[in-house]
Each structure stands twice: as structure tokens, then as C-alpha cells.
Amino acid sequence: MTDLTVDHKAIARRLLRMEGLPLEGIDPLARLLRTAHPLQLRAGAVLVNEGEEARDLLFVARGSIQVHVKDASGQRSDLTILRAPFLLGHIAIIDAGKRSATCEMATDGLVLALPRTRVQALVTSTDRGAEVLRDLMLSGMFRQLDQATERLRVFLRAHPEVHVELADPDHP
């Protein structure tokens, strides 16, 4: 596995299409992706560990990722397999938080890593590539929230015995 050939423009196009964003952002996003560090990874390689500090924003350009967490008893619980292309770790980067799951390569793949310090600078930049990256991150966050809401809705419909009462922190 030695193919480090990266078609930044094709990756940008696929990322934008995946999120339904305007394709005029391809060139600015491709320029930004050229500044990321390419990582050629084998199947089984751990990309991020649950609970570790987020150091990089990751663009999975080729391959698939197995996502898993530890349940309350400490046992591994597989959540999903994600297939390239996609953005990984944007919430933890923005929140300066910890990784919420362990992600390991399910197949050989190529990942582009953009350091947190660079992402933090891009968040306030007026550069067109930074604008496209912000749109990509926001779209991904919205999609994840929407999917989580739907999973919760399905769970609650399947388990009517579960009563959920939302607390208002402003009115205890």
C-alpha cells in the first residue's frame, strides 16, 4: 500500500456533493485540502481513540472506518461503518473536546489530517476555502443531529414504556 496520490479536487467535489453544498466551492476547498497531511493507513489501524483529545480534523478520502464505543460495562459496542468521503472529528475540534468514539480503519485508506491550530485559524478566516470548510462542518453537524434525533424518535416509538421529560435548566 504505497499509493499516496491525492486528487484534492476530486475529494473536494465528493465532500461537497455528499453534503449537498454548491460545487463552486471545489477549487477553494481543494486548495485547503492540499495543506493537510496525508496518512496512508492499513485496515485495523486506529485513527482516533474514544476519550482522547482531538488534535486533527480528518478528511477520510479513501476507505472505510469502523466506529465503536465502550458501553457501561466496558465492552466494545460497534456503532457503524462509514465509507469515504467524509469529515471526521469536526465537533470535537470545534468544541476543543474529547473524541466521542474510537474509529479504526475497516479497510485500507487515505486520510488527510488538518491540525486543530490550523482549523481554529480557519474558523475566523475570510478566505473562501475557510468559508467552504465552515459550511461543510456545519452541514455535517446538522446531518448528525438530524440522524440522532431520528434514531431517538424510532427508539421511543418502539419503547412506549420509556418516558422522557426534558428539563429546563433555567426553570428547575
Image (cartoon, helix red, strand yellow):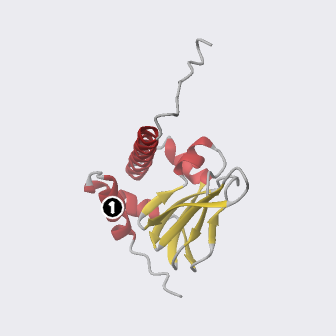
- Asked whether residue 34 appears in the rendered view, the answer is no
Q: Is residue 14 left or right of residue 109?
A: left
Q: Give the amino acid at mark 1.
A: Asp
The foreground one among 41 and 65 is: 65
Percent across and percent down for residue 170 are 58, 14
Asked whether residue 86 appears in the rendered view, the answer is yes
Q: Residue at x 31, y 63 (%)?
A: 13
Whether residue 56 is situated above or below residue 170 in the rendered picture: below
**Which residue is rendered at x = 52% and y = 50% of the image?**
90
Residue at 35 percent across and 68 percent down: it is 9
SS at mark 1 in the image: helix
* Vertical order, 167 against 107 (above or below): above
**Pointer 1: what residue?**
27
Q: Nearer the viewer, residue 110 or 80?
A: 80
- Coordinates of residue 6 in the picture (x, y in percent): 43, 76
Residue at (44% x, 69% y) in the render: 61
Residue 115 placement (x, y as % from top left): 60, 57
Q: Quadrant of residue 67?
A: bottom right
Question: Quarter-wise, where is residue 94 in the image?
Answer: top right
Q: Residue furthest front?
A: 161
